[in-house]
Image (tube, helix red, strand yellow):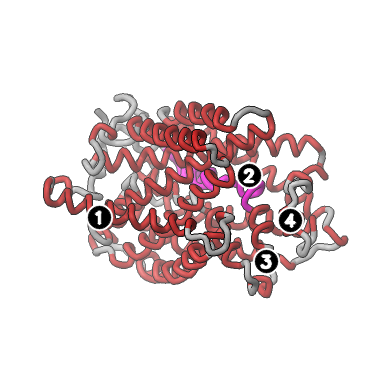
C-alpha cells in the first residue's frame, strides 16, 4: 500500500486553481453578492470585500509559512500539532474535517435546488447525480480534477468580467458611482452581516495547503494562496461595484431582494441572451467543481490523519501502486459522509438552500476562520526547528500578529451576526448551535489525543509528524499541470 501521495504533481498554477475554484467566483456572483446586498443593505460592499481580503491575506501568511515548512496534507492538523501541541493538532484536524465536509456537502443542496428550478424534478435526485460525478473524479489522479477545475474557473472569470462590462457600460443615472468604495458606507447597522458574508466568500482559498505533498515546489503554496486571495478580492469587489453601478447604489438592496429583478442575470442580458445561458450553465459547473475541490481537501485530511493512526489506518489506502494515485480511502469516506447528510436532509424535507446550504456553509466558514486564526497563533509560537534557519519576522511574527488582531474582529462580527446569515428570527438561540458544534468538536479532538497518549503512546508521539521520506514515491512531473 502506498504511504505517500504522488510527488511533484501540482504546479503553482494547479495549486492556485484549487483555491480559486473552491471559492467559486460564479457562486459568489450569483449567490453571495446578491444575498449580501439583499440582507444587509450595505452600499459599501465592494470596499468591504477589499478589507476582508486584506484580513484573510494577512491571516494566510502564517498558515502558508507553516504549511510550507511541514509539508503535511492535513494542513491545520499538522500546523497546530507542531506549533501548539499534539492535542491541539487533533482538535484542529477534527474541526477541519467538520468544516470542509460542511461546506462541501452544503453545495449539494445548492446544486440540487438550482437544477430542480431550471429543469424540474426533485433536488435530491440532482444532488445524487452530482455525488456520483464528484465521487468518480475524486478517486482519479489529481491532474484530471485540476484540468476540469481550470476550464470551469477560466470561463467563470470570463463571465464575471462580462458582467462588470455590462454593469458599468450602462450605469443607473447615466454616470459611474463610486459609493461602493466610500468608507462612510461602512458605518451602518448591517456591516457585521456584510463582513460575515464576505468571509464566507473567501473560504476555500486555503486549499493549496492540503496539496503541499504533491506540489512541484513547496514555496508555491504560499504564492498560490496569497495570489488566490488577491485575485478573488479584486474580482468580488469589481462584481459588487458593477452590480451597484448597474442598478444604483441606493436601489441595489431592494433589487437584490426581489427575485423578479433577476440579478445578476438581468445585467448580463444587456450583452445578449447567450451570456445568460452560458452563465446559468457555468453556475452549475462551478458548484460541481467547488464540491470537487473541497472533496479533494477532505480526502487528504482523512488520508494523512489515518496514515498516522489518529483515524483508522484502512482509510490511508490509495488507489493503486501506480505513480499517480489519489487518496482513495479518504475520497470514499467523504463521498459516504456527503451521501448520508444529503439523504438525511432529503428525508427530513428541509429546504435545500435556506436550510441545508445556508446552515452548513456558515458552519464551515466559521470553522475555517477559527482555524486560520489558530494557525497564525501556531506560527508565532512555533519552535525554531519548525521555522527553519531563514525564518523572517514578517512571516513568523508580524503578519500572524496582525492577522490575529484583524481576524478576531472579523470572527466576533461573524458570530454576532450569525443569525442574520442564517435568516433566523431575532433572539433565536439556534444560530449559536454552530459555534457550539465547533467547540464540542475541538474538545472531542483534544480528548481523543489524550486517550491516544495513554493507550497508544507511539501513535500520540507521531501526531503531525507522519510526512513521508522525500523519495517515498517517484516524481510525476511529466503529468503535472
| Residue 291 x/y as whole percent | 50, 38
Residue drawn where x is 35% and y is 35% of the image: 330
Q: Are marks 2 and 4 in contact (CB under 8 Å)?
A: no
The residue carrying mark 3 is 44
The part of the image, by quadrant, that contains residue 42 is bottom right
Label 3 CA crowd tier, 10 Å (few <14, some 14–19, many 20+): many
Q: Nearer the viewer, residue 300 or 107?
A: 107
Instruction: Compute the Cα span from label 2 to label 1.
Output: 38 Å
Task: Determine crowd level at label 1: few under 14, some 14-19, many 20+ residues with C-alpha closer than 10 A.
Answer: many
Work out how far the residue at label 3 is from the one at label 4, CA to CA, in angstroms.
12 Å
**Residue 235 is a magenta residue:** no
* Label 1 secondary element: helix
**Disc 3 vs disc 4: Cβ atoms closer than 8 Å?**
no
Q: Nearer the viewer, residue 38 or 159?
A: 38
- Does residue 454 appear in this view? yes
* Badge 4 or badge 1: first in the primary sequence: 4
Q: Residue at x 72, y 59 (%)?
A: 253
Evaluate whether residue 235 shows in this view.
no
Which element type, helix, strand or loop, lies under badge 4? helix
Disc 2 to disc 1: CB gap under 8 Å: no
Residue carrying label 1: 446
Q: Earlier in the sequence, mark 2 or mark 3?
A: 2
Magenta region, residue range = 10-32
Question: Percent x, y for residue 331?
Answer: 38, 33
Judge whether residue 26 is colored magenta: yes
- Quarter of the image for the N terminus: give it: top left
Tag of residue 175: none
Amino acid at each position: 500500500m502506498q504511504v505517500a501521495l504522488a510527488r511533484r504533481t501540482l504546479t503553482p498554477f494547479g495549486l492556485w486553481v484549487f483555491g480559486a475554484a473552491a471559492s467559486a467566483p460564479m457562486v459568489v456572483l450569483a449567490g453571495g453578492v446578491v444575498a449580501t446586498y439583499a440582507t444587509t443593505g450595505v452600499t459599501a460592499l465592494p470596499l468591504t470585500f477589499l478589507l476582508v481580503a486584506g484580513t484573510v491575506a494577512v491571516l494566510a501568511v502564517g498558515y502558508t509559512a507553516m504549511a510550507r515548512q511541514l509539508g503535511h496534507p492535513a494542513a491545520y492538523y499538522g500546523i497546530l500539532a507542531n506549533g501548539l501541541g499534539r492535542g491541539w493538532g487533533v482538535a484542529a484536524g477534527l474541526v477541519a474535517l467538520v468544516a470542509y465536509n460542511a461546506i462541501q456537502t452544503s453545495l449539494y443542496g445548492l446544486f440540487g435546488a438550482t437544477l430542480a428550478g431550471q429543469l424540474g424534478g426533485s433536488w435530491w435526485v440532482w444532488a445524487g447525480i452530482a455525488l456520483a460525478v464528484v465521487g468518480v473524479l475524486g478517486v482519479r489522479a489529481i491532474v484530471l480534477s485540476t484540468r476540469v477545475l481550470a476550464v470551469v474557473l477560466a470561463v467563470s472569470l470570463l463571465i464575471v468580467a462580462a458582467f462588470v462590462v455590462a454593469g458599468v457600460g450602462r450605469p443607473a443615472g447615466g454616470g459611474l458611482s463610486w459609493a461602493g468604495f466610500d468608507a462612510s458606507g461602512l458605518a451602518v447597522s448591517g456591516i457585521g452581516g456584510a463582513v460575515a458574508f464576505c468571509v464566507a466568500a473567501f473560504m476555500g482559498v486555503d486549499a493549496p495547503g492540503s496539496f503541499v505533498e504533491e506540489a512541484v515546489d513547496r514555496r508555491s503554496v504560499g504564492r498560490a494562496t496569497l495570489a488566490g486571495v488577491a485575485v478573488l478580492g479584486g474580482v468580488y469587489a469589481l462584481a459588487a461595484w458593477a452590480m451597484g453601478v448597474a442598478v444604483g447604489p441606493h436601489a441595489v438592496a431592494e433589487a437584490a431582494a426581489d427575485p423578479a429583478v433577476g440579478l445578476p442575470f438581468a445585467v448580463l442580458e444587456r450583452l445578449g441572451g447567450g451570456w445568460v445561458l452560458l452563465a446559468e450553465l457555468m453556475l452549475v459547473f462551478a458548484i460541481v467543481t467547488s464540491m470537487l475541490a473541497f472533496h479533494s481537501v477532505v480526502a487528504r485530511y482523512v488520508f494523512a490523519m489515518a496514515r498516522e493512526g489518529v483515524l483508522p489506518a484502512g482509510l490511508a489506502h490509495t488507489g493503486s501502486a501506480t505513480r499517480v494515485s489519489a487518496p482513495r480511502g479518504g475520497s470514499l469516506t467523504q463521498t459516504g459522509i456527503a451521501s448520508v447528510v444529503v439523504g438525511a436532509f432529503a428525508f427530513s424535507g428541509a429546504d435545500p438552500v435556506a436550510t441545508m446550504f445556508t446552515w452548513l456553509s456558515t458552519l464551515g466558514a466559521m470553522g475555517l476562520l477559527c482555524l486560520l486564526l489558530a494557525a497564525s497563533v501556531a506560527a508565532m509560537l512555533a519552535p525554531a526547528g519548525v521555522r527553519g534557519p531563514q525564518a523572517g519576522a514578517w512571516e513568523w511574527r508580524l503578519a500572524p500578529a496582525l492577522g490575529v488582531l484583524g481576524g478576531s474582529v472579523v470572527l466576533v462580527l461573524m458570530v454576532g451576526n450569525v443569525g442574520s446569515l442564517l435568516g433566523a428570527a431575532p433572539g433565536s438561540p439556534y444560530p449559536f448551535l454552530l459555534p457550539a458544534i465547533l467547540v464540542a468538536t475541538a474538545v472531542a479532538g483534544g480528548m481523543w489525543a489524550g486517550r491516544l497518549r495513554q493507550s497508544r503512546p507511539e501513535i500520540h508521539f507521531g501526531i503531525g509528524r507522519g510526512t513521508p521520506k522525500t523519495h517515498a514515491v517517484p516524481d510525476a512531473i511529466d503529468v503535472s499541470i
